[in-house]
Amino acid sequence: MSSVPFVTLNNGVKMPQLGFGVWQVPDEQATVAVGQALEAGYRSIDTAALYRNEEGTGKALAASGLPREELFVTTKLGNGDHGYDSALRAFDASLANLALDYVDLYLIHWPMPLDDNYVDTWKAFEKIYAEGRAKAIGVSNFKPAHLRRLLEETEVVPAINQIELHPNFPQAESRAFHSAHDIVTEAWSPLGQGKELLQDPELARVAAKHGVSPAQAVLRWHLQLGNVVIPKSVTPARIKENIDVFGFDLDDTDMETLGGLDNGTRLGGDPDNVNSR
Ligand code: NAD
């Protein structure tokens, strides 16, 4: 049903290049939205302990009747659970909430560098990975300096770094660092949260040229760069629209036009300063 291609992570695990994000979706609504996404052909779902909708997400996964091996489930460690023992306990809680016996991808949600505990946290992730309870482990919101420490002080290279990334904030330095170290780049807020980006007149011209919506053109830009994307919507028509991005190609000029929309706009926190719980 789905024509979503896979990317191969650095441990051989295959991950759909396009998935469904559920940040800011209340738990009960997550059951509905994830159900609609699975119906529309999405197989990869991105949740987090911090989103407080792992249970609702898990209910939709179970209700779908889809074989577990066809699903790709990501969740993330909450910021209050850094540290070796806390991370192990938090992972157990996430699995229980999701009603799963493994996740496909487990991420450290934020590095929280002032707490300076992400190296120990990562060692817990290595244990979870060795036990097969996460098929792949990765990080989120890590800058190259944070990744460098993991590469120097721990064993397993993160499979993924999930970072804020959209045409207004294309993260060239991080993307280059990731590809040099065999780490896949995953884009959060790939649509710029549906704000100013989707109103951009140059984006509108590229979208019109291909007879697609601005959101579809942006998702295509990500996919052609090699990013994994996890757009979010709770509107059934948009859920379908956002996965219907495999029937056209942007040309080099279009890619340059969208790449030229970089204006340094960060919609979320700067990872160096996010240390709140
Ligand atoms: P997004 O860029 O996916 O934008 C979502 C919003 O865009 C929707 O709420 C809606 O208003 C609008 N939209 C969606 N589809 C549209 C369409 N086809 N046409 C017009 N408007 C449309 O923003 P997001 O939810 O912030 O990011 C996606 C996912 O990334 C999240 O749900 C979450 O899973 C993940 N995320 C992770 C982090 C992190 O720290 N790791 C942070 C933010 C988000």
Image (spheres, grey):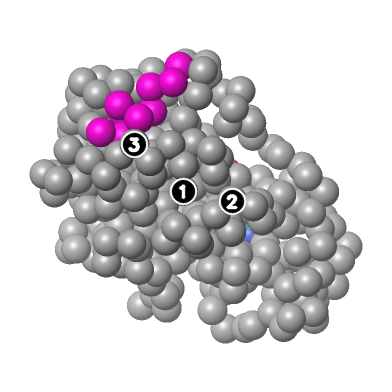
Tell me the chief SS of the magenta region. helix
Q: Is residue 221 above or below residue 97?
A: below
Real-space Cα separation, disc 2 to disc 3, in angstroms:
20 Å
Between 191 and 126, the one lying in front of the other is 126
Q: Quadrant of residue 15?
A: bottom left
Mark 1 sits on what residue? Answer: 161
Do callouts 2 and 3 mark residues in contact (Cβ within 8 Å)? no
> How crowded is the residue under tag 2: few (<14 C-alpha within 10 Å), some, or many (20+)?
some
Q: Which residue is mark 2?
A: 174
Of all residues shown, which one is farthest toward the right? 201
Label 2 sits on a secondary structure element that is helix
Type of the residue with mark 1: Asn
Q: Earlier in the sequence, mark 2 or mark 3?
A: 3
**Which callout, 1 or 3, points to the residue nearer the camera?**
3
CA distance for labels 1 and 3: 17 Å
**What residue do we see at 38% from left, 22% from top?**
117
Q: What's the amino acid at mark 3? A: Glu
Task: Label 1: state its secondary structure.
Answer: strand
> How packed is label 3: few (under 14 Cα within 10 Å), some, or many (20 or more)?
few
Residue type, numbered disc 2: Ser
Is residue 209 rendered to the left or right of residue 134? right
